[in-house]
Image (cartoon, helix red, strand yellow):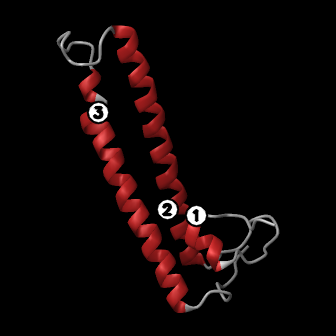
Amino acid sequence: METTINHLNEDQIKELRELLEEKHNRIATELNRLETEELPGLSRGEEANDGYGDDAKRDQIRQRLVAQIKRRRKDLAEINAAKTRMQDGSYGFDERTGAPIPFARLQVIPTAREKVQ
């Protein structure tokens, strides 16, 4: 559905674009830290005094980190999808009904794809 974002004014769109960009930068920084510092620090070849304890505990921590990384990648994909919708004019509309999503909801969840009743 191609549409124009006529229920949002320029200032609102600018604010939402900035929110998306800020969120993108924060998540990308966190993702980079998880991938380059946290996860490599769990390699099995490290000394026993690494603070992680035994292999089972290290594996459990690794699984949590991998889940966090997957979630952050999904978050970035949602942000990029919202930016794309902003460019093509379909941003801010419920994907099922086509109804405008209120600005207040978009301020809280700038990646929202549906209007909550």
| Residue at the image point whose x is 45% and y is 28% from the top | 64
Considering the numbered disc 3 on the image, is that residue within a helix, a strand or a loop?
helix
Q: Is residue 110 above or below residue 36?
A: below
Considering the numbered disc 2 on the image, is that residue within a helix, a strand or a loop?
helix
Q: Which residue is mark 2?
A: 80
Q: Is residue 77 above or below residue 83?
A: above
- Chain-order first, disc 1 or disc 3: 3
Count of picture labels: 3
Q: CA distance from mark 2 to mark 1?
A: 9 Å
| Residue at the image point whose x is 56% and y is 66% from the top | 82
In which quadrant will I find the N terminus?
bottom right
The reply to whether residue 23 is in sight is yes
Q: Which residue is mark 1?
A: 111
* Image quadrant where residue 112 sits: bottom right
Residue 38 percent across, percent down from the top left: 29, 33
| Residue at the image point whose x is 40% and y is 31% from the top | 65
* Label 2, residues with CA under 10 Å away: few <14, some 14-19, many ≥20: some
Residue 24 percent across, percent down from the top left: 41, 61
Q: Is residue 96 above or below residue 90?
A: above
Q: Which numbered mark, 3 or 2, is in the foreground of this view?
A: 3
Residue 39 percent across, percent down from the top left: 31, 30
Q: Which numbered mark, 2 or 1, is in the foreground of this view?
A: 1
Residue 49 percent across, percent down from the top left: 18, 13
| Residue at the image point whose x is 54% and y is 85% from the top | 12
Q: Amino acid at mark 2?
A: Asn
* Label 1, residues with CA under 10 Å away: few <14, some 14-19, many ≥20: many
Question: Would you say 49 lies left or right of 34 here?
Answer: left
| Callout 3 touching callout 2 (CB < 8 Å) | no
| Callout 1 touching callout 3 (CB < 8 Å) | no
Q: Amino acid at mark 3?
A: Glu
